[in-house]
Image: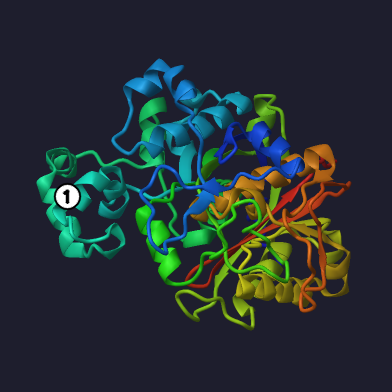
Amino acid sequence: MKSMNQSPKERVVITGLGAVSPFGAGAEYLWQNLLQGNNGLSTIRHLPIAGDIVAIAGSIPDVSSAIDADSKLKAMASLDTSIPKFFLAAKEAICQSGLDVASITAQRLACMVADRPFSPTSIMALYLASLTKAAPSKQLADLDASSYWQALQANAALRQYYQAPEQDSLNHFIARYYQLSGPLLSIGTACASGNNAIGEAFLKIQHGELDCAIAGGAYDFDMNSMVGFTRIGALTPHRDPDTACRPFDLNRSGFVMGSGCGILVLESLSHATARRATILAEVSGYASYSDGYRATDPDPSGLGARRTLKGALDCAGLKPEQIGYINAHGTSTKMNDRTETNAIKAVLGEHAYQVPISSTKSMIGHGIMAAGALEAIACVNALRDNMIHGTRNYQTPDPELDLDYVAETHRALRFDHALSNNFGFGGQNATVIFSRFMAKE
């Protein structure tokens, strides 16, 4: 029983969306490409991939014209070239929301973007010439930590940046651009990060700690990503970017890396209503539980995933039969797709066979920390348009996976609640439920 003096929970709504993806800049542009089933994956051109390292991914195309069009953004350009292009997503979301960030009391607005802050491994990718110069007889993939450090010491620009007091991340960059002084939180839970960022912002607003939050995730793969994920066997060895990623298909063989950034503006309903904002959808449920199993494999029993799905339903106060669509983690790996399918069946029961499921990753790759946020945008727009996108390359059903995986074409569907899964390395699971906004009496 609730305490008599316990305040009612705030409803949390979405008022802005922004994206930079392998299709380019723009949340609506992302959505239309997903509906059309277009392929955002291609051969990697900007990194010196060699040998057996996987050479396909969802790379972000040139968006420099959009960066150059913002003189303030161009003047603030970061050494990490990912930051300005990711900022385009934040700017888009804030502009769509109509949020006047300067008018909000500092502690009531948070920036909670899951991103990879400045680190030796991320910055090294910007100085590949220095790396190879430091060890000319070695392949880049063979460089050890000592060789990395030698390359760092040999590069004056890197030394100067490491010694500078300011270290960049997208959260910090957004705060400087808009002169925000509220809470900043970068959540690093691998592939679950985007969902965790949205979910934790949801909880803080729901419990009255914040009025609004700029939330989402960003990720730009580099040589370390491609080498590491290739070496552990997580990436598909399939070399054709047009057919390599095939979630839930019998012939799936691993995921395809992706880059991108998805940003959502979340607000309490009272805050959004007071300023007469256009409400796009509602965040109604969230949960996150871990497997406690292995660093690179999900628990085959799917215990953490099942707890997470059930927790999100309980948080939203929904019954399984009220879920109308699932945007799956759907990585295209043998184990994940099987584990996720089993978790869905365990939690939704017979209703699992009635719910359409699709994978955004089939078209843009696995954006790691950005994945959940980009998929959230797909869910919100699906609610708006009564339309869900398909799963590219789903052609040959796997007898072990027997749910309604939407094939390569979009499907008209009127539904009120979408469940979005993201399950990360280390057994980090996060589920968010997005709902059609309906005013309550």
Say which residue appears at 39% left-offset and 53% top-offset: 49
Q: What coloring was used for the rendering? A: rainbow
**Residue behind mark 1:** 133
Residue 397 in percent (x, y) is at 80, 69
In the rendered structure, which amino acid carries the disc numbered 1? Lys
**Which of the image's four quarters has the N terminus?**
bottom right
Nearest to the observer: residue 338 or residue 46? 46
324 relative to 199 in the view: left or right: right
Position of 96 with respect to 154 (left or right) is: right
Camera sees residue 201: no
Position above or below: 202 against 21: below
**In the displayed structure image, the side of residue 216 where residue 224 appears, left or right:** left
| Circle 1 residues within 10 Å: few <14, some 14–19, many ≥20 | some
**Nearer the observer, 413 or 337:** 337
Can you see residue 48? Answer: yes
Q: Residue 96 appears in which quarter of the rendering?
A: top right
* Residue drawn at x 77%, y 79% as measured from the top left: 400
Relative to 88, 142 lies left or right: left
Q: Residue 213, percent across and down?
A: 53, 40
The front one of 54 and 59 is: 54
